[in-house]
Image: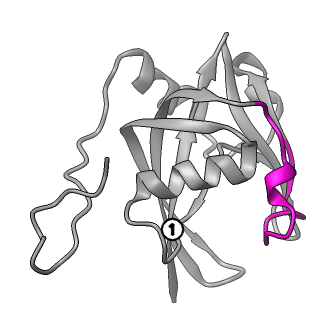
Amino acid sequence: MKHRIRAAGIALQDNKILMLRVRDQYSGEYWIPPGGGLEDSDVSSKQALVRECREETGLDVTVGPLLCVREFHEISTDRYHVELFYLLESWSGTLSLDNLAGLNDSEYIQQVAWVDIEALNQYKVFPADIASTILPLIKTEQFATHLGSYVQGSNDDVNYLD
């Protein structure tokens, strides 16, 4: 079985949440928070999320605290995913899919949009409990503890997370 670590960002603005409308052959069309898998050049999950948000949304983001973790087994690829959901504290730029040109997600991602939180129940959304579980964590500031991102070796006391 293969493994994948994905960092995803939760951005809220005016009772809306930043989401991507995506489509694949197994799950059809659904909405997810922006984010993606760690690549060889990423030194932390937060850095991966900054890169992914720029690619998928056109926004430059500041990644805040870890909110929660979700795991799932993607049967179609026999891949086990661990997803780290972070609060996006701030952002700048204009929503755009232009940065996807030439990347492997250009056909998968259909739209980036601010979606009314109250309308989420009208859509297929992953994680399915984003409105009932993740958003209340933000409201009550119940953040998870992330111990950091370290590299084994002579500088193993350096935290690369921030």
The colour scheme used to paint the residues is one colour
Which residue was labeled with disc 1? 38
The spot of residue 82 in percent (x, y) is 46, 64
Q: Position of residue 135 (x, y in %)?
A: 51, 25
Q: Quadrant of residue 78?
A: bottom right
Q: Is residue 55 above or below residue 31?
A: below
Question: What residue is at 22 percent from the left and 66 percent from the top?
Answer: 150
Instruction: Please provide the residue range marked out in magenta.
Output: 94-111
Q: Residue at x 52, y 86 (%)?
A: 2
Q: Based on the displayed image, in which of its 4 quarters is residue 28 positioned?
A: bottom right
Give the residue displayed 85% in from the left and 70% down from the top: 102
Front one among 114 and 157? 157
Q: Quick one: 135 or 86, which is closer to the camera?
A: 86
Q: Is residue 52 visible?
A: yes
Amino acid residing under circle 1: Leu
Image quadrant in which you'd find residue 132: top right
Image position of 133 (left or right of 98): left
Q: Residue at x 29, y 39 (%)?
A: 144
